[in-house]
Image: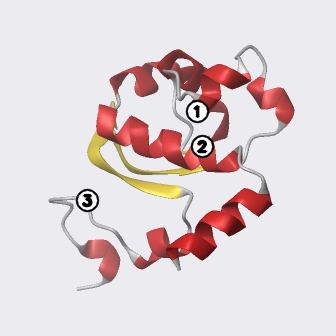
Amino acid sequence: MKPNDQAHSAPETTALDAIDPNTHTLDTPLVRGSQTIDKITLRKPRSGELRGVSLSDLVSLDVVALSKVLPRITTPTLTEHDVANIDPADLVQLGGIFAGFLMPKAVKASIASLTA
């Protein structure tokens, strides 16, 4: 059996997730018509993609703010409706990835040295 042929009974962390910390395997996959989304990758937003939301709301991981920004930076592209229907545990994980984009490199390095 090839790795891609495995049944999707429960989300699991893969080597790809370990390589790409910006990818999250959903605890509860999203179903959009005939499409099932089980992994979401975020990319660092550009300043223009933060338009219309308060930076303080984003830092606080405000659901409304995240529902506006996540569709602009996710692969596959989520809709606001998708974000509204995502499992709260998954939303927190995606929010955590997003929050990492707002940290300066020095802070990330400091955190990494504390956990190493």
98, above or below 104, in the image: above
Q: Which residue type does callout 3 highlight?
A: Pro
The label number, if any, that marks residue 11 in the structure image:
3
Relative to 85, does residue 28 appear above or below in the rendering? below
Q: Which residue is drawn at the image coordinates 56% and 71% (left, top)? A: 114
Q: Nearer the viewer, residue 102 or 83?
A: 102
Whole-angstrom CA distance, mark 3 to mark 1, is: 21 Å
CB of mark 3 within 8 Å of CB of mark 1?
no
Kindly report the distance in space between the C-alpha atoms of the residues bearing marks 2 and 1: 9 Å
Sequence-earlier tag: 2 or 3: 3
| Residue at image location 48% in from the left, 21% down from the top | 63
Q: CA distance from mark 2 to mark 3?
A: 21 Å
Bin the neighbour count of mark 1 within 10 Å (Cα to Cα): few under 14, some 14-19, many 20 and up.
many
Tell me the SS state at disc 1: helix
Helix, strand or loop for disc 3 = loop
Residue ID for mark 2: 98
* Tag 2 secondary structure: helix
Q: Are marks 2 and 1 in contact (CB under 8 Å)?
A: yes
Specify few, some or many for label 2: CA neighbours under 10 Å numbering under 14, 14-19, or 20 or more: many
Give whichever of discs 2 and 1 has the lower sequence position: 1
Quadrant assignment, res 20: bottom right
Q: Residue 116, percent across and down?
A: 53, 80
